[in-house]
Amino acid sequence: MTVTAHTVEYRTANGLNLKSTLYLPTQAVDGLSGILVAPEWWGVTEHAKNAAKRLAEEGYAAMAMDLYGDARLTDDAAQANEWMTEVLSDLTALPERTRLALEALAERPEVNPHRIGAIGFCFGGRVVLDMARRGDNLKAVTSFHGILGTPTPAQEGFVKGELLIEHAGKDVMVSEEDVAAFRKEMDDAKVRYHIDVFPEAKHGFTNPQATRNGEKNGVDLAYNEAAAEQAWQNMLDLLERNL
């Protein structure tokens, strides 16, 4: 299926211009299910945009979210960490930016506002899980090698959809203790969730650029094609069930 790309711009209350990229099936009809895509800490990468494009090829309206403003992008870990830390240190920043993205997608004439999900990679995994924890109206949420910890744990009754965690067994950034704590958090909040563990995969395993990024920055990242494809299919199955 062929797709078209559209820049979707919106502003925060303090005037930050966010530039997300929306992909639609070329033969878009009304009532499409929508998917938000939260990128890694690098910014709106080709990886995030390619994920949104692949979702559009499956018949979804998918939008790669700009979380930093002006679609800023880097492959330098120090710069990425600075941007991520900055946005996390302001406790209102991500809730506002993700809410604006959700509203922008839901308001599109092609999209059914009652059938929206979200996926995220690494930092973006934390972003979409926190959206679910806050009670955003998301039917399905997938975290790929995402950060599972949060200062705002899920409360019973808040999470509206089903969660899927695609976790790398050799992830140096998310420990087995983190996974266990997440299980307990979800069980306590009576959330529908599933965790898949890929024993040989490392952090960033879905991103074809991960190995290069890791070598450049001295971080233990690696692309794993087999795990990436299986995780993607698991996510498609989740969306099929819920959207």
Image (cartoon, rainbow, N blue to C red):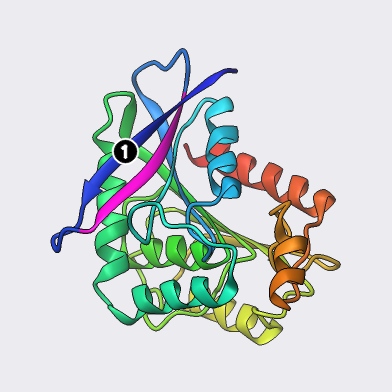
Q: Nearer the viewer, residue 61 or 84?
A: 84
Name the residue that disc number 1 marks: 8
Magenta segment's dominant SS is strand
Image quadrant where residue 107 sits:
top left
Q: Magenta span covers which residues?
A: 16-24
Relative to 99, 155 lies left or right? right
Q: Residue furthest left?
A: 13
Magenta run includes residue 22: yes
Frontmost residue, 59 versus 237? 59
Residue 212 sits inside the magenta stretch: no
Q: Is residue 22 above or below residue 173?
A: above
Q: Residue at x 58, y 46 (%)?
A: 46
What's the residue type where badge 1 is placed? Val
Q: Position of residue 100 (x, y in %)?
A: 25, 51
Q: Residue furthest bottom?
A: 177
Q: Residue at x 73, y 51 (%)?
A: 208
Q: Is residue 224 visible?
A: yes
What's the residue at 72%, 80% (across, down)? 172
Quadrant in which the N terminus is drawn: top right
Q: Quadrant of residue 164?
A: bottom right
Residue 90 position in % (x across, y down): 28, 78
| Secondary structure under the numbered disc 1 in the rendered image | strand
Name, please, the residue furthest toward the top. 27
Q: Position of residue 6 (x, y in %)?
A: 39, 30
Mark 1 crowdedness (10 Å alpha carbons): few <14, some 14-19, many ≥20: some
**In the image, residue 225 above or below residue 80:** above
Residue 13 in the figure: left or right of residue 106? left
Please state if 30 lies on the left or on the right of 234 as rendered.
left
Residue at 36% from the left image edge and 35% from the top image edge:
7
Q: Is residue 155 visible?
A: no
Residue 142 position in % (x across, y down)? 55, 55
